[in-house]
Amino acid sequence: MSFLTKLFGKKPDPTAEFAVPPTPVKLVWDTSTGSLNGIPLGAPVSALEPLGPCPDVRHISDKAIFFAYPHLGLMLELHDGTLEFITLCISEHDYSPVGETSANAELTILPAGEVLTANMDPEMLTHLLGEFELTDKDEDEVTGNFWMGDLVHEATFVEGARMVSLVIYRDE
């Protein structure tokens, strides 16, 4: 069985509907290795297998493909065939990049072993994700980056310091 057959459950057809796996994969982000479920940033598409079948593949351009896992609250962005961005929906918001029916991601952060929640403010997250730097603030949202070496954890917060999303990438 080919990798794509295993990933999609049959021949790849981005417009086809796929059954959501009955038991969602538990998401684990390891800050020491920069990997999600053992899949490091920069990994090829073949490394996505631990996440199970991908129900929503979006071909954005010849070089960019989004793999959306709404049942996990997760979207992976690959450029030139390698993983560059990991987007996690942490709580409800007017716009979800993963999709309107996206679940909220349940992410365990290693090595601390803590589960990321929408109620964690920037001060609480500093010990998990590194030093915080405010990058944008308006009346509706606050966005900032947590830095761990070249790993960037870009968090967006709304009213009441509720985190709505987390985007992970390497600063190059």
Image (cartoon, rainbow, N blue to C red):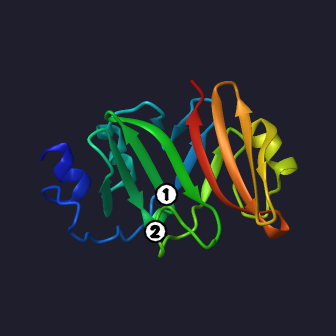
User: Going by the image, does 34 lie left or right of 66?
Assistant: right
Residue under the image location 83 percent in, 56 percent down: 121
Q: Secondary structure at mark 1?
A: strand
The spot of residue 163 in percent (x, y) is: 72, 61
Which residue in the protein does label 2 denote?
A: 99
Question: Where 1 falls versus 73 (above or below)?
Answer: above
Q: Where is the C terminus found, in terms of image quarters?
A: top right
Which residue in the protein does label 1 denote?
A: 74
Q: Secondary structure at mark 2?
A: loop
User: Going by the image, does 91 lie left or right of 43?
Assistant: right
Residue 100 visible in image? yes
Determine the image quadrant of residue 30: top right
Callout 1: 10 Å neighbours few (<14), some, many (20+)? many
Q: Amino acid at mark 1?
A: Leu
Q: Measure the alpha-carbon separation of dots 1 and 2.
A: 10 Å
Residue under the image location 40 percent in, 58 percent down: 68
Question: Where 126 falls versus 87 (above or below)?
Answer: above
Q: Amino acid at mark 2?
A: Gly
Residue under the image location 58 percent in, 67 percent down: 104
Q: Identify the residue at the far right of this view.
A: 123
